[in-house]
Amino acid sequence: MNIAVFVSGRGSNLRAIIDSNELKNLVEVRVVCSNKSGCGAFDVAHQHNIPTYSISSEKVDGYINYEELLPILKEEKIELVVLAGYLKLIPPFFVREFPFKIINVHPALLPSFGGQGMYGIRVHQTVFDSSVKISGATVHFVNEEYDRGLIIAQSCVDILNVKSPEEIAAKVLEAEHELLPWVIKKIAQNKVEIVNNRVEIKE
């Protein structure tokens, strides 16, 4: 299965996908895209000779827009778009081009602690301030709203005795690195189905 990975940061989830032994013969990362031309994830992509594209909804030198990206993804025969720490809302027309073929990893247990502006350390600060005892990672399908698509899978993390949002972030990131490749594997194996508006995963 050919996938495109969208990133905004240093690319630790991208690296987890590339390094996953379970994905070695199932998945190939064909394209890496980012809203930041200087992001660390591009360094990861270049280390593996993966083409990179800087994308923007606005007209910016050195960037392409989502309309220009579509034929590139079609040329690469992309079957799944993975948002792995991508901080921008995907345009509705783009979502419609890939129905239930775009997934996102979110650093909290949705539907709590999601929505516009809830990313990075902001999420973990809010979780910390709420005094909840469990956080985790969520992988969900992407629709036209922030963090509102059907939930595919979640992984819980015990934060009973954490002392800071940064400690939560570190624990949740470890969960993301396991959960996201696992979900991609299940999709590549055609073991993910939507039944009665719920996502079911076969063994």
Image: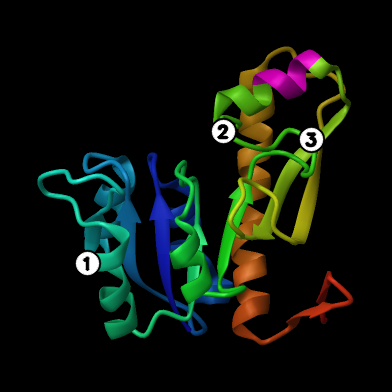
The quadrant of the rendering that contains the C terminus is bottom right
Instruction: Tell me the crowding category of disc 3: few under 14, some 14 to 19, or many 20 or more residues within 10 angstroms, Cα based.
Output: many
Look at the image and tell me whether residue 110 can be seen.
Answer: yes
Q: Which mark is residue 49?
A: 1
Q: How is the image coloured?
A: rainbow
Type of amino acid under label 3: Ser
Type of amino acid under label 1: Asn
Relative horizontal placement of residue 5, taking residue 191 as reference (left or right): left
Relative horizontal placement of residue 191, taking residue 43 as reference (left or right): right
Residue range highlighted in magenta: 125-129
Q: Nearer the viewer, residue 49 or 30?
A: 30
Is mark 2 in CB contact (under 8 Å) with mark 1? no
Measure the alpha-carbon separation of dots 3 and 2: 14 Å
Q: Which mark is residue 119?
A: 2
Measure the alpha-carbon separation of dots 2 and 1: 29 Å
Q: Residue at x 27, y 52 (%)?
A: 55
Is mark 3 in CB contact (under 8 Å) with mark 2? no
Relative horizontal placement of residue 35, taking residue 198 as reference (left or right): left
Q: Residue at x 78, y 50 (%)?
A: 155
Q: Please provide percent x and percent y for residue 173.
A: 61, 40
Instruction: Tell me the crowding category of disc 2: few under 14, some 14 to 19, or many 20 or more residues within 10 angstroms, Cα based.
Output: some
For residue 67, what is the image quadrant? Answer: bottom left
Q: Nearer the viewer, residue 6 or 172?
A: 6
Q: Please provide percent x and percent y for residue 148.
A: 70, 51
Residue annotated with mark 3: 135
Quick one: SS at disc 2? loop
For residue 21, what is the image quadrant? Answer: bottom right
Q: Residue at x 78, y 53 (%)?
A: 154
